[in-house]
Amino acid sequence: MSKVTLRARELPEFWGAAILTVKAASDDAFWRLLRYFVGFYRENLFNDHWGEHAQIAGNNVLDLLMVCHDLSTEEVKKIWQPFLDWVARSPAAYTVQGQPILGSMPAQALLGRGVEYVAVMEWCLSMGSKLLVPSGC
């Protein structure tokens, strides 16, 4: 091969993420969580902005690592608030493990560095109170 054409796209304004783990207290609660999440995904995340994965782990745990582009931190928070509210309404059935991370950052901040774990952690630390951490979780 003597010629390669690279097709580039404009860098999005923002890159962001929703990273959280929800544990259900019982099998029945876990099935309700999965049903709710699938509907939430269909209505809010099944679009060009969101990607990555939701993992069904053992012990009734749903691990979410969703990434997005072109959404501000405020927009990310607004999208995920109904899901967090639903979880928080049933504290006996669901617990959010650790601190959820919901937010975005200028995509230009990661350009040239690659999406490295260290860069993401630096971003999380720099966001501090700007990240949404739901009360009661």
Image (cartoon, rainbow, N blue to C red):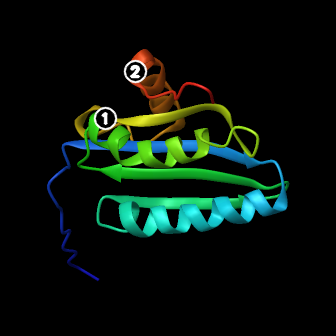
The disc, 1 or 2, on the residue closer to the chain's N-terminal end is 1
Q: Nearer the viewer, residue 64 or 114?
A: 64
Looking at the rendered structure, the kind of residue marked 1 is Thr
Q: Position of residue 35 (x, y in %)?
A: 61, 68
Judge left or right: residue 13 versus residue 60.
Answer: left
Label pair 1/2, CB-CB below 8 angstroms: yes
Helix, strand or loop at label 1? It is helix
Kindly identify the residue that appears in the image at 49 percent across and 68 percent down. Answer: 39
Viewer-nearest residue: 40 or 104:
40
What SS does tag 2 mark? Answer: helix
**Residue, disc 2:** 127
Q: Residue at x 20, y 68 (%)?
A: 6
- In this rendering, does residue 66 appear at all? yes
The answer to which image quadrant residue 53 occupies is: bottom right
Image coordinates of residue 125 in percent, x first then y, are 48, 19
Locate residue 104 relative to residue 17 in the image: left or right.
Answer: left
> Can you tell which mark lies on residue 55?
none
Location of residue 14 by image quarter: top left
Residue 13 x %, y %: 18, 43
User: Dot 2, how many residues are within 10 Å of its Cα: few (below 14), some (14-19), or many (20+)?
Assistant: some
Which residue lies most toward the left here?
10
Quarter containing the C terminus: top right
Mark 1 neighbour class, 10 Å CA radius: few under 14, some 14 to 19, many 20 or more: many
Badge nearest the viewer, 1 or 2: 1
Residue depicted at 66% across the width and 43% down the height: 90
Rounded to the nearest angstrom, the CA distance separating label 1 from label 2 is 10 Å
| Residue indicated by mark 1 | 73
What quarter of the picture does the N terminus occupy? Answer: bottom left
Spot occupied by residue 17 in the image (x, y as percentages of width and height): 43, 44
Residue at 47 percent across and 44 percent down: it is 18
Count of numbered badges drawn on the protein:
2
Amino acid under disc 2: Met
